């Protein structure tokens, strides 16, 4: 039905030129309803993709030793740590457990320790035992001579695994405390421990005669710095400070102890 645009009076169909009520001019085209809009079927939208977590690192050979074999995993892990430590620590799972990492550290450190003891025994066999005279009495000199003998060497090899394990645990604890003091501990202690444990791969350098043990000790520190930087996501400067801080404090304590001992000896002499 058409309506007058002014008074809204119903009009005849077809409408006249003027509204019979108010006399307004009628334009039939105004009230012609628009053509119907065809309906478009709604296309269902695909469901939103579920958020997926980032895949874990691919892992390292030592964590796959049951599949690869003990010897293969040990050799491959050591080679990867020494050849490309940054890539190794980026692929390492930070929370892969501390038991296996400790076992690896003790094994490779023990290999280097055996080499050091063997080379020292060969050296003493050639040049003779050189026990420094520290003036601590005949009991100390006898104990020192016993340790340098065959029985002492065997005793060192038996006790060494326990000492090496304790050294790894204590070193990792000191490094993690230093990281916490420097606001660099972005992961837990197990991550720091795994870094320090696999850094012991450098102990195999002690197999090289003469300077191998010294180079191994320095390279363990370097590998630890690289690992802490990669695993905790911190700069290498902060990682270096965290590793060197316990060493500096230990040296200061040693120097302080030596100073106190020297003062006591001087006082007793006077």
Image: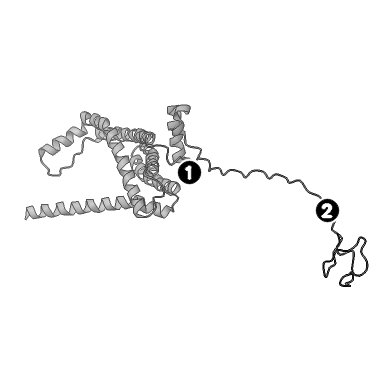
- Of the numbered discs in the image, which one, if any, rests on residue 90? 1
Residue 92 lies, in percent from the top left, at 46, 40
Where, by quadrant of the figure, is residue 153 drawn? top left
Please tell me whether residue 166 is drawn above or below residue 13 in the rendered image. above
Where, by quadrant of the figure, is residue 81 drawn? top left
Residue 177 lies, in percent from the top left, at 33, 49
Residue plotted at (28% across, 34% down): 162
Residue plotted at (84% across, 58% down): 34
Q: Nearer the viewer, mark 1 or mark 2?
A: 2
Q: Nearer the viewer, residue 180 or 90?
A: 180
Farthest bottom residue in view: 23
Q: Residues within 10 Å of mark 2 (few under 14, many from 20)?
A: few
Please tell me whether residue 250 is drawn above or below residue 13 in the rendered image. above
Disc 1 to disc 2, how far (Cα)?
64 Å
Residue 263 lies, in percent from the top left, at 13, 55
Residue plotted at (44% across, 40% down): 82
To which residue does mark 2 refer? 36
Where, by quadrant of the figure, is residue 6 drawn? bottom right
- Of the numbered discs in the image, which one, if any, rests on residue 148? none
Q: Residues within 10 Å of mark 1 (few under 14, many from 20)?
A: some
* Left or right side of 49 for 257: left
Please tell me whether residue 210 is drawn above or below residue 155 in the rendered image. below
Residue 47 lies, in percent from the top left, at 64, 43
Asked which secondary structure carries label 2, the reply is: loop
* Left or right side of 148 for 238: right
* Left or right side of 254 for 32: right
Please tell me whether residue 31 is drawn above or below residue 195 in the rendered image. below
Q: What quarter of the picture does the N terminus occupy?
A: bottom right
Asked which secondary structure carries label 1, the reply is: helix
* Left or right side of 183 for 32: right
Q: What quarter of the picture does the C terminus occupy?
A: bottom left
Q: Nearer the viewer, residue 165 or 119?
A: 165
């Amino acid at each position: 039905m058409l309506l007058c645009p002014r008074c809204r009076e119903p009009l005849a169909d077809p409408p006249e030129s003027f509204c019979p009520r108010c006399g307004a001019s009628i334009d039939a085209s105004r009230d012609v309803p628009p053509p119907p809009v065809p309906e478009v079927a709604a296309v269902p939208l695909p469901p939103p993709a579920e958020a997926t977590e980032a895949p874990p690192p691919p892992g390292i050979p030592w964590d796959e030793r049951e599949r690869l074999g003990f010897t293969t995993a040990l050799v491959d892990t050591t080679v990867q740590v020494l050849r490309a430590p940054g890539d190794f620590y980026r692929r390492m799972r930070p929370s892969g457990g501390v038991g296996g990492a400790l076992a690896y550290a003790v094994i490779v450190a023990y290999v280097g320790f055996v080499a050091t003891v063997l080379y020292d025994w060969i050296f003493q066999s050639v040049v003779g035992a050189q026990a420094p005279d520290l003036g601590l009495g005949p009991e100390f000199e006898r104990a020192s001579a016993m340790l340098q003998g065959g029985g002492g060497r065997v005793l060192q090899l038996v006790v060494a695994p326990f000492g090496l394990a304790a050294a790894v645990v204590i070193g990792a604890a000191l490094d993690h405390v230093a990281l916490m003091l420097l606001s660099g501990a972005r992961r837990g202690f197990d991550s720091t421990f795994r870094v320090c444990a696999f850094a012991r791969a450098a102990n195999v350098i002690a197999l090289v005669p003469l300077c191998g043990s010294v180079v191994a000790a320095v390279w363990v520190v370097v590998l630890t710095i690289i690992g802490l930087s990669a695993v905790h996501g911190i700069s290498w400067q902060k990682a270096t400070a965290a590793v060197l801080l316990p060493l500096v404090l230990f040296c200061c304590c040693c120097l302080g102890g030596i100073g106190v001992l020297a003062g006591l000896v001087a006082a007793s002499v006077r």
